[in-house]
Image (tube, rainbow, N blue to C red):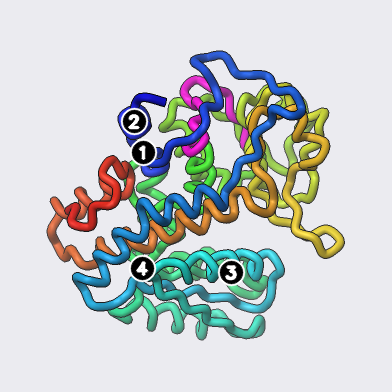
Amino acid sequence: MSQNILDKNPLIYSCIPRITAMCGDVMFLPNDSDTIVMNGRKFADEYAERVLKPRCIGFKGKYGRLPKLVTILVGENPASESYLRIKSRFFSTLCLDSEVLRLSKDINERDLLNTINSLNNNSNVDGILVQLPLPRHIDADKVIESISIERDVEGLSPGNVHAWAKAIPNLVPATALGVLALLKYYEISLEGKHTVIVGRSMIVGKPVLHLLLKENCTVTICHSRTKQLGRHTRQADILIAAVGKAHLITADMVKKGAVVVDVGVNFLDGKLVGDVDFKTVKSKTSYISPVPGGSGPATVSMLAGNLLLAAELQKTGDNKEQKECLRDYYKNYTIVTDTNYC
């Protein structure tokens, strides 16, 4: 690959050489042995070395402390615990400070909001993440909206949603960024491709829709109540499964040569599995992400990037020019390993 990939794809996820998935408008049709399993752990490791660590070291040198994320977990949830373990392992390899506040499932809404308000006003906290879902007696929308926009590393507060919906560089949900990260890492052609997203959540489905529209994909959104789901998924050049139902996507629902990204997090007989029946679907795909080891590590690396961006933005004050420079840097990364950029 003679041309620097950064020249061809100047986006946050385009900074590392990788294998070409498509050639022009012709998708390679795989034999069983030709299917490439998308390695989210490999992506995360390389992204950390080339992008995250230099900026993290620069932040510590300039401000004398580590960027800090506080994650709030209310009650217990197996999927949340799995995500927290991945995040903890990944953050431990970086100069990032991560704290988990474990609160009782019986906490009342007012006390939770007061906890978030206290974190909003703590100058040593750069990012706040509330792990969803929340217990039914708590209004999740009210809780997310209480997080200050500059500390909302999941990109779900009203101001951040408005920004990513208009394709303005800002804090975007990390899981959605992780999907695009894997597609970019494997150099999968997006423009003009028909992408079908199964799932309409604010964490994955809706932000991925906007990210891929910006890449000039033709996007179809399906969900748990879509009738004749297979009729839609079989049309997909790129299929993204994010509905949260174990093995929902089976081989007969995928066309030959499709790219499949599995974002599902489910537990089946005590084992972590995705929304895609990996064993039967794999042979029909050109690229497929596994669960675990696919979108999960990519998501955590994007969360770390969001934390660093949030931390640096908070240090700029009213300097609009510097804010725009930072947003552009964290979007493009056309200059990697430069701790003095902006």
User: Which type of secondary structure does the marked residue at label 3 adopt?
Assistant: helix
Indicate which label's residue lies in the foreground, 2 or 1.
2
CA distance separating discs 2 and 1: 13 Å
User: Which type of secondary structure does the marked residue at label 4 adopt?
Assistant: loop
Q: Name the residue under label 4.
A: 148
The residue under label 1 is which amino acid type? Leu
Q: Mark 2 points at which residue?
A: 4
Measuring 58% from the left and 69% from the top, which residue is drawn there? 84
Labels 2 and 1: the sequence-earlier one? 2
Labels 2 and 4: the sequence-earlier one? 2
Is residue 53 left or right of 36 when viewed as pictured?
A: left
CA distance separating discs 3 and 1: 27 Å
Q: Are marks 2 and 4 in contact (CB under 8 Å)?
A: no
Indicate which label's residue lies in the foreground, 2 or 3.
2
What numbered label is drawn on residue 84? 3
Labels 3 and 4: the sequence-earlier one? 3
Q: Quadrant of residue 276?
A: top right
Q: Nearer the viewer, residue 133 or 35?
A: 35
- Residue 289 higher or lower than 194, as above or below: below
Q: Mark 1 points at which residue?
A: 11
